[in-house]
Image: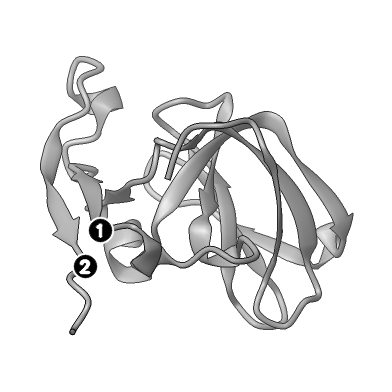
């Protein structure tokens, strides 16, 4: 997948929340994280600037969750529970958007996904993001 500023339509699982996301660098920012929350959530995310998500319906159906420092805010549908996006702690003027919520996109479209060390968060590590590993999807036959 290549970088672009294409607007991508998206939604939660039940369709109560619908949005359009303009990705900062297309799919070049695809990643996962090892922090306690992201590790349990397991989502693959890409970047959109603040203002890069436009809600078509259901913004009022979103619930948010904050933990630890309270800096990052994670949004999910209050009906189906699907994580749609979050405001990043590492770059507060960016959202991380769940690629699985984007129409026609699957986390399995990416052969390799960098996994960042969120346990040793850049805000706690002199601003350095550290690669923890790479998640690989190898399709069967």
- Few, some or many residues within 10 Å of mark 1 (<14, 14–19, 20+): few
First along the sequence among labels 2 and 1: 1
* Residue drawn at x 21%, y 48% as measured from the top left: 115
- Viewport quadrant of the C terminus: bottom left
* Residue drawn at x 83%, y 51% as measured from the top left: 55
> Residue 3 location, x and y as percent?
48, 32
Residue under label 2: 137
Name the side, left or right, on which 71 lies relative to 23: left
Residue 130 sits in quarter: top left
> Residue 105 location, x and y as percent?
53, 63
Q: Specify the farthest residue to the left.
A: 133
Name the side, left or right, on which 69 lies relative to 72: left
Residue under label 1: 111
Residue 40 sits in quarter: bottom left
Q: Specify the farthest residue to the front.
A: 141
The count of marks equals 2
> Residue 134 location, x and y as percent?
14, 51
Q: Are marks 2 and 1 in contact (CB under 8 Å)?
A: yes
Work out whether 129 lies above or below 69. above
Label 2 sits on a secondary structure element that is loop
Name the side, left or right, on which 90 lies relative to 47: left
């Amino acid at each position: 997948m290549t970088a672009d500023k294409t607007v991508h339509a998206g939604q939660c699982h039940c369709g109560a929340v619908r949005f359009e996301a303009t990705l900062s660098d297309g799919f070049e920012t695809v990643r996962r994280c090892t922090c306690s929350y992201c590790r349990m959530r397991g989502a693959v995310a890409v970047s959109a600037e603040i203002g890069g998500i436009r809600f078509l319906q259901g913004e009022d159906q979103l619930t948010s969750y904050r933990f630890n420092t309270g800096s990052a805010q994670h949004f999910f549908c209050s009906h189906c529970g699907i994580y749609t996006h979050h405001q990043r702690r590492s770059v507060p003027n960016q959202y991380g958007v769940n690629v699985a919520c984007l129409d026609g996109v699957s986390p399995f479209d990416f052969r390799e996904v960098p996994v960042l060390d969120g346990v040793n968060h850049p805000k706690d590590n002199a601003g350095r993001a550290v690669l923890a590993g790479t998640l690989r999807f190898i399709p069967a036959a």
